[in-house]
Image (spheres, rainbow, N blue to C red):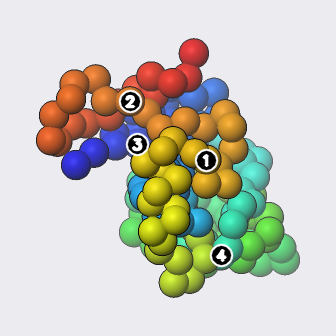
Amino acid sequence: MKIYRLSQLAADTPGGEYRLGSNELKMEEFTLLYGALRPHEAGRKIIPSSGAGVVCVIKGSINVKCGRTSFSAISGSAFPINNGQECVFDNVYDTEAAYIIANGKAGASVTADAAEKAAAGQPENEPAAIKEPQAIRDESEYIITKDEAIS
């Protein structure tokens, strides 16, 4: 079993986000995005790439603007966002805020064809720049804290 330390993976990226795609999760048309907002960071644009999504604030508080709706989401709260709907996240506080976005198509699961493609290393509609992180050790259970594929 792979265990992804999302906060460490996101900290290593310039945008403060790390996306687990369908290849890593072995789930067709599903992604899980972890993001962190630094204190007083503003203007983080969020646009779900496939299907609807659910945002869950897991740390701090985030001011959210989606269309004509604005609200504050605190740790432990969740809200839906629609495919293509742009939302803007602001952290107006002195502490870091973090969120997870799960998005995909309802009822999507890995098909035999998709599983065969994943086993053969063929892409499943994933962007070319995102590659599955490689484990440091070959064990039945391991923790991934660095994407070895990114140079």
The residues tagged by marks 3 and 4 sit, at their Cα atoms, a distance apart of: 21 Å
Q: Label 1 crowding class (10 Å Cα cut-off): few <14, some 14-19, many 20+?
A: some
Q: Nearer the viewer, mark 2 or mark 1?
A: 1
Q: Which residue lies under the disc numbered 1?
A: 123
Res. 144 image quadrant: top left
Q: Which residue lies under the disc numbered 4?
A: 52
Disc 3 residue type?
Leu
The residues tagged by marks 2 and 4 sit, at their Cα atoms, a distance apart of: 29 Å
The secondary element bearing badge 4 is classed as strand
Q: Label 3 crowding class (10 Å Cα cut-off): few <14, some 14-19, many 20+?
A: many
Tell me where residue 122 appears, x and y as whole percent: 57, 45
- Looking at the image, tell me whether mark 2 or mark 4 is earlier in sequence order: 4
Q: Label 4 crowding class (10 Å Cα cut-off): few <14, some 14-19, many 20+?
A: some
Q: Nearer the viewer, mark 1 or mark 3?
A: 1
Q: Nearer the viewer, mark 2 or mark 4?
A: 2
In contact (CB < 8 Å): disc 2 and disc 3: no
The secondary element bearing badge 3 is classed as helix
The residues tagged by marks 2 and 1 sit, at their Cα atoms, a distance apart of: 16 Å
Res. 65 image quadrant: bottom right
Which dot marks residue 6?
3
Which dot marks residue 134?
2
Q: Of 21 and 138, which appears nearest the observer?
A: 138
